[in-house]
Image (cartoon, rainbow, N blue to C red):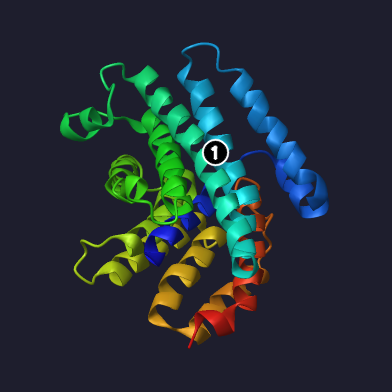
Amino acid sequence: MKCYFRIVSFCLLCIWGSSCSTAYYLEHHPGFTHDVFHRKVILAEKKLVSNDDKLYLEAAKLRAQYTYAFIVEKADRLIEDDYESGKKLYAKALESFEKATSYGKKAIQFRHPELQIMMDWIMEDVTFTEKDVPYLYWLGAAYGGAIGSSRGKAKWVIQLPIVGYLLETALEIDPSWNYGAIHSAMISYTMARTDLMGNNVENATKHYEQAMLFSNRQDAGAKVSFAENVHVSLQKKDEFELLLKEVLSMDVESNKELALGNIIARERALWLLSRTDELFY
């Protein structure tokens, strides 16, 4: 079931363009960043008093970002030393991601009133446009986070195809969106799929290459995701270390829109490198 736990790693790639101020605090005053970001989430949620799809999209995005960066990242590390405490944090993350999925679904439903249940989205011939791409992406991110944080609970694992539907639909509309962010998200999703008949690595590699193309190799999150999901799966230790060290040497703030996610990715790269002996045998 570890492949399902790792699906949450694509939420690392969701931490883009939240604000230059948040990236600044994370880089220069990390002790304050949790409170700064949490206040942003609460403020966004307090604005949910009307059927404004943009407000619900913002709440879904910020809630998903916050949960991954400040709850899941801590849980990933804690569970290695304190299993019970780690499980409690994952449960907290799941509860938070459930809020994000609720906001994300409402955001799309306000844009498309005819889509009242998820089955409508998949079964009906829905015409989404470029304006829908962020809505599809962030809802996919929230679902992916919930699946990973559930630690293999059937209720969430069976919803993995929903993640695929949302991401693949967005990808068909605009594959270059936000410096290839959808391709980045597809790396861990592709490695978690059970229907690719052993072609997971090949497909994940194609998405990684596209993410590098559209981001001009500036998306550190895609590099970390590829190392964590593909290199570990193939037990390619040298390639794993080389790619993560490349992340450590990057100017993570050269692209301001990717800065926040890149800073998070750099910290995860450091942590993964510290676990090299555990990940490779």
* Quadrant housing the N terminus: bottom left
**Residue 126 percent coordinates (x, y):** 22, 28
**Residue 255 percent coordinates (x, y):** 63, 51
Which three-letter amino acid code belongs to the residue tagged 1? Ser
**Residue 257 percent coordinates (x, y):** 61, 45
25 relative to 52 in the view: left or right: right
Q: Residue furthest front?
A: 84
**Residue 5 percent coordinates (x, y):** 44, 59
Q: In the rendered view, tell whether residue 62 sits above or below residue 256.
A: above
Q: Is residue 210 visible?
A: no
- At x 67% / y 59%, what residue is drawn? 252
Residue behind mark 1: 96
Q: Is residue 140 visible?
A: yes
- At x 38% / y 18%, what residue is drawn? 110
31 relative to 86 in the view: left or right: right
264 relative to 180 in the view: left or right: right
Q: Residue furthest bottom?
A: 281
Q: In the rendered view, tell whether residue 210 sits above or below residue 163.
A: below
**Residue at disc 1, secondary structure:** helix
- At x 41% / y 72%, what residue is drawn? 230
Q: Residues within 10 Å of mark 1 (few under 14, many from 20)?
A: many
